[in-house]
Image (spheres, rainbow, N blue to C red):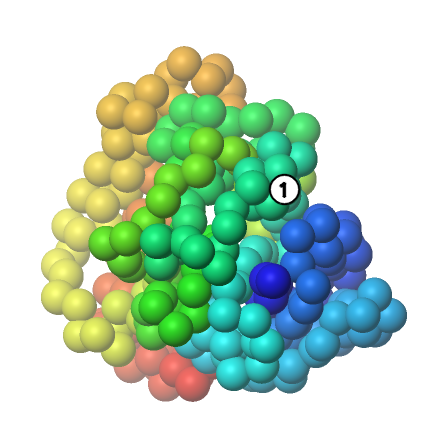
Amino acid sequence: MITANIITLNEEKNIAECIASVAKVCDQIIIVDSGSNDATVNIAQSLGATVVHQAYLGDGFQKNVALDYASNDWVLSIDADERLSEEMVEEIKKIDLNQSQYDAYAFRRKNMIGSRWMKECGWYPDFCVRLYHKKRARFADVKQHASIKSENICKVKADIIHYSFSHIGQLFCKPGRDFSGRAAKIMYLKEKKINSYSPFIHGLSAFLKKYLLQKGFLAGVDGLTVSISAGLSGYLKYARLLELKQDASVLKKENFNKIW
């Protein structure tokens, strides 16, 4: 059988549908909550999930917490704003996990803006490893952009649906998430070297990659907006890193024990 692994923070709008989605293939559901002050925990417990309380450690570290509580060897990791497509459910049910020669399985991620499927800008097929054997694979212990690395992964042609953003405005300011500040603090702790040109160079590079190389221009306003957002994000995280290195008063106010 399979254990679902879901990390949460104030996901009362998403958690019920997420649990209902993974319950189609999982017999155990573990929620690792990092201090929700809404109804997330109560909803999860009412639906039979086991809730583990853990202050946020960073992406990879947080996603590995559930492994100590998982009663199954196979774990399905999913975010609260993601859902299993019916196709994905059927493909998972077809797999004989007891006899599997693979360490993990990757699925295409179908990223959405509102109800619109974003295919360009590198957003699809965006294969992500989500089903893995906990004794043979796990998320890298890093604080951002964690993924499962293995030489023995099977790519499954089925989609996990990611309701990334409710509308295009969230591309620039998603509630509760300071992505540029998070990235800047992590880079600062890693002693990342930059200069005064770094924000401009990285911002422009990110925009051009999304809009030209990954064909964002084919997606109309959505493609342009995603590309601008990527450019702005690239610019801001390096601008904020530069600020941390150059302004002692700003640096003093930052709490590096809290990434978010």
Nearest to the observer: residue 14 or residue 89: 89
Residue at x 75% of width, y 71% of height:
49
Q: Is residue 116 visible?
A: yes
Instruction: Report the number of discs.
Output: 1
Q: Is residue 148 left or right of residue 117?
A: left
- 116 in relation to 17, above or below: above
- 72 in relation to 146, above or below: below
- 35 in relation to 8, above or below: below
Nearest to the observer: residue 104 or residue 191: 104
Residue at x 66% of width, y 35% of height:
86
Quarter of the rendering occupied by the N terminus: bottom right
Label 1 element class: helix
- 157 in relation to 98, above or below: above
Image location of residue 106, percent across then percent down? 41, 46
Residue at x 54% of width, y 59% of height:
76
The outermost residue toward the right is 46
Image location of residue 52, percent across then percent down? 65, 81
Q: Is residue 123 visible?
A: no
Q: What amino acid is labelled 1 in the image?
A: Val
Would you name the residue on which mark 1 appears? 89
The outermost residue toward the front is 99
Image location of residue 233, percent across then percent down? 38, 48
Nearest to the observer: residue 213 or residue 72: 72
User: Mark 1, residues whose alpha carbon is within 10 Å: few (<14), some, or many (≥20)?
Assistant: some
Residue at x 61% of width, y 33% of height:
87
Nearest to the observer: residue 185 or residue 133: 133
